[in-house]
Image: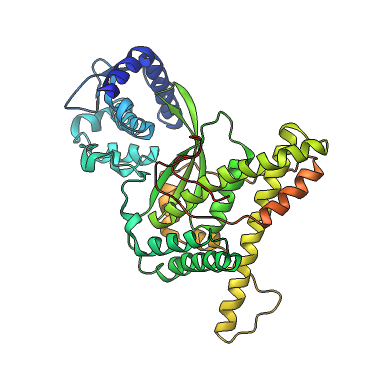
């Protein structure tokens, strides 16, 4: 009931803003359809309906979308329906003969959808958003089936041991968990080659500007935990503001671990900075520069530590097969394995048709004491266990907590 009242309040407050956002996106869609000439103006309306998610009326030149879409589903789904109706408009305007003689979702409509790079789920006559209680889109997690995966249960138990006060026991458990993850992904690659279990999990960053910390944690997850990462921005109709997200792409068992790593590292680096901050101030390093130097060097040091562990595992694997490795042996980096997964690459290209890989420089702020302390903290940082969903410390990290 409270959700319904809140939804009605938002519709009254932001309805005009939602129409403006949809109109701007509609104009951008048409600007991408080069070579089809100019399109006459269109009116975008929000409707209340129990039978339709949207429609295109060529006689009145109206594209109508159901206001429930905006309140009940991710903005990706709203844009998917908008593109579907815009494809109908383009067929009417650019191919009038086809609009008269073909079925509504015929070959010309499908051709326009392909030019838009519209996901297949939005290219049909019926888009059933009620199926399985949720939208047919990859933003997840969709369910908790991965929580019962025997591999994930075993890894969680090992990670629980990595919080042991006995350093050798903790190190052995963490190393074994990492080895299990690596072996699982390599051993099951052929088995899962024909499966459709890729998902996209979205983590809100709750910030106006994506911090360097977020990019570095995403780099660590991408390099070592068998997922792809994308930093993204999307309009949030509930706040009428753009929202920043980190999106994790991969198989559920890996996404679950990557999600844990993200939340653990996000909290842990802030906690470690809080402990270092007084010492930094005592050495004349204050403010954002000192914090950035500390956290940047900490995360880069952790990345190097994980890479070194992967190199050591590669050497041990070669020795187990009777091969004596030389100094030129390279580590089997999870990111290399992921990049070789062609089916995953196709999934990424389909869901992110305009994705570009851009290199980011990680300039270190001039704060030598904090930089050195950060590097040392990264060398000593381990990744601990997930805890039960819903627990939190000071409300800052939902569902995940690191050991002190």
**Does the image show residue 338?**
yes
Percent across and percent down for residue 293 are 73, 42
54 above or below 368? above
Q: Quadrant of residue 154?
A: bottom left
Viewer-closest of 104 and 43: 43
Q: How is the image coloured?
A: rainbow
- Residue at 65% x, 44% y: name it: 272
Viewer-closest of 304 and 49: 304
347 above or below 205? below
Taking the view exactly as shown, the residue that stands out farthest to the bottom is 322
* Label tally: 0
122 above or below 64? below
299 above or below 338? above
Percent across and percent down for residue 10 are 35, 17
Percent across and percent down for residue 127 are 23, 37
Viewer-closest of 9 and 173: 173
Percent across and percent down for residue 351 are 41, 44
Instruction: Name the image quarter holding the N terminus.
Output: top left
**Does the image show residue 66?**
no
Viewer-closest of 199 and 353: 199
Taking the view exactly as shown, the residue that stands out farthest to the left is 51
Q: Quadrant of residue 285?
A: top right
């Amino acid at each position: 009931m409270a959700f319904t009242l809140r939804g009605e309040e938002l519709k009254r407050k932001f309805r005009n803003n939602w129409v403006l956002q949809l109109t701007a996106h509609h104009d951008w869609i048409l600007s991408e359809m080069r070579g089809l000439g100019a399109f006459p103006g269109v009116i975008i309306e929000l409707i209340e309906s129990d039978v339709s998610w949207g429609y295109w009326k060529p006689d009145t030149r109206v594209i109508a979308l159901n206001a429930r879409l905006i309140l009940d589903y991710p903005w990706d789904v709203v844009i998917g329906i908008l593109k579907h109706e815009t494809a109908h408009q383009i067929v009417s305007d650019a191919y009038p003969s086809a609009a008269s003689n073909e079925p509504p979702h015929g070959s010309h409509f499908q051709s326009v959808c392909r030019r838009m790079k519209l996901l297949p789920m939005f290219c049909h006559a019926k888009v059933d958003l009620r199926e399985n209680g949720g939208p047919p889109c990859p933003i997840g997690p969709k369910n908790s089936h991965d929580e019962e995966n025997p591999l994930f249960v075993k890894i969680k138990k090992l990670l629980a041991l990595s919080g042991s006060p006995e350093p050798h026991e903790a190190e052995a458990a963490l190393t074994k968990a990492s080895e299990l993850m690596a072996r699982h992904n390599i051993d099951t690659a052929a088995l899962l080659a024909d499966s459709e279990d890729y998902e996209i999990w979205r983590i809100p960053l709750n910030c106006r500007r994506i911090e360097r910390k977020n990019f570095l944690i995403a780099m660590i997850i991408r390099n070592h935990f068998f997922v792809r990462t994308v930093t993204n921005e999307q309009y949030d109709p509930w706040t009428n503001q753009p929202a920043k997200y980190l999106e994790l792409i991969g198989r559920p068992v890996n996404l679950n671990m990557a999600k844990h790593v993200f939340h653990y590292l996000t909290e842990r680096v802030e906690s470690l900075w809080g402990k270092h901050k007084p010492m930094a101030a005592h050495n004349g390093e204050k403010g954002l520069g000192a914090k950035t130097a500390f956290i940047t060097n900490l995360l880069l040091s952790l990345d190097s530590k994980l890479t070194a562990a992967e190199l050591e595992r590669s050497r041990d694997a070669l020795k187990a097969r009777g091969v004596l490795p030389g100094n030129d042996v390279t580590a089997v980096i999870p990111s290399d394995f992921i990049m070789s997964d062609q089916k995953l690459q196709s999934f990424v290209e389909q869901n992110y048709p305009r994705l570009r890989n851009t290199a980011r420089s990680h300039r270190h702020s001039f704060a030598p004491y904090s930089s050195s302390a950060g590097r040392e903290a990264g060398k000593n940082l381990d990744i601990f266990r997930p805890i039960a969903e819903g627990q939190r410390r000071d409300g800052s990290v939902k569902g995940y907590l690191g050991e002190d």
